[in-house]
Amino acid sequence: MSDVRQPALPTLPPPWHTPEREALQQQVRAFARDEVLPVANRLDPEKGLIPEELLARMGELGYFGITIGTEHGGLGLGAFEYCMVAEELARAWMSVASIIARAQGLGTGLADSSERERLLRLSAKGEWIGAIALSEPDAGSDLASVHTRAVREGDEYVLTGQKRWCGNAKAADFIQILCRTRDPEEGESRSAGLETLLLSKPRGEFVPGLTGRPIDKIGYHGFLTWDLELDGVRIPAGNVVTSGEQEGGFSGVGAWLDIARVHTAARAVGLAQAAVEDCTVYLQEREQFGHPISDFQALRFALADMASEVEQSRAMYRQVSHLLDQGITCTREAAMAKLRATEMAATVTTQAMQLHGGNGYTTERQVERYWRDARLTTIFEGTSEIQRKIISDSMLPRPQQ
C-alpha cells in the first residue's frame, strides 16, 4: 500500500454502491494508510504484535462491531461492509484485517440472554476479542476427526487434548474450542458429538491446565499463532455456544466458515491491490536504459493483467457478500470467491516482486510482506484443495467411499 501516491478509489457498482458505503471505505482507507501502515512497516520486520493502542483506536472507530446491531453498540452493518473494511485494512497489514474477525459478536452465543447482551457490547467495543481453536495436529481440513475430549463433571466440562494453529490465543479474552463430548453412535456422521465450548480467560494469560508455545511463522505477523495443550481445562457447562456467529457443534462451524472464507477473499484482494499500487509507483520511479521502466511494454502489460485479476476477485467477493446479506446460503459461492481471490493474490504478489527486481527480494520494500501474507491465504480457512472439493461436490455425485 504505497504511501507515496494513491490511485482513485474504485467505483462501487450498483446495486452495491451507497454514499454511506463509500464514506466508510474512504474512512478505513485513510486509517489504514495513516495509522496502520506506519505501524506495520515498523513492527512486521521484527515480528511485533499489534499495539494495544491501535486495537483501542479500531474499537473507537467501530471496526470490531461492524456486524453487531446498533442496539448492542455496533454499527449494524452486514457482510458486505465487513469484507470491504477487511480489504482496506489488509492493504496495510493483514493481521489488522484479521483481528476484527475475532470480535463481531464471536464468543457471545450463550443461552443466558443477559450475559449474551453484556458480551455483545464488549465485543462491539473491541473489549471481547477472541481466538478459535479448531485444528489439531491430526485434524486440519478434516475437522470431523477432532479428538480433544470434553468430559462432563458436575456443572463443568473438563477438556484434554491438543489444538494447533490457534491465532491470538494468549492475547485473547476467550477461546472457542471445538471438542468432542461423545463418540458418534452407529449410523451417525463422524461429526456427531462435536460441540463448541467457550473458555473465558484473562487477556494476555493462560488458565490452569492450558499451556502453549508460539509457532514460528514466515509471515502473518502482528499476533502470535499457538500450539496449545489442554490438560484438565475446566469450562462451565453453560458455556456451550448455541447461537450467534456460531450455532454450536460442527454445523455451526460450517456456517461460520462461509463468512470467514469471503472475509479471507477480501483480505487477499487487499494484499494484491496493495502490491498493484506499489508496482504502479515503482515502475515510474525506477529507471533503466535511460527510461523509467514503466515505458517498457512487457512491464506495463504485466501491471494491466495484475490490476484486472484484482478487480475480478473484488467483484466476486462483493457479489457473494451481498448474497449473504440477503440471507442466501452461499457455501459453494463462498468457496469459489475464496479459491479465486487467494490464488490470484499469490500470483499477483509474486509478479509484483518480479517487477521490483532485486529490490522486491528485500525487506526494504512492503511488497515482500504482501507476498508472504498472500501465500498463507491459500491455506487457512480451508486450503485451495478443500475449496475445490466443496465446489466439485456441489456439482457432481460424491465419490463412493
Image (spheres, grey):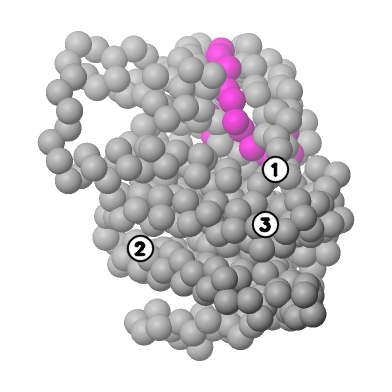
Badge 3 marks a residue whose secondary structure is helix
Q: Quadrant of the C terminus?
A: top left
Q: Which mark is residue 184?
A: none
Badge 1 marks a residue whose secondary structure is loop
Disc 1 and disc 2 in contact, CB within 8 angstroms = no
The part of the image, by quadrant, that contains residue 393 is: top left
Q: Which residue in the structure is indicated by mark 1?
A: 219
Please rate how many residues cluster around mark 3, counting C-alpha atoms within 10 Å: few if below 14, some from 14 to 19, many from 20. many
**Front-lying residue, 164 or 122:** 164
Give, as a three-letter code, the residue at label 1. Gly
Q: Which residue in the structure is indicated by mark 3?
A: 353
Please rate how many residues cluster around mark 1, counting C-alpha atoms within 10 Å: few if below 14, some from 14 to 19, many from 20. many
Using residue 276 as the reference point, say whether residue 193 is left or right of it: left
User: Which stretch did the figure color magenta?
Assistant: 157-177
Give, as a three-letter code, the residue at label 3. Met
- Tell me which label, 3 or 2, sits earlier in the chain: 2
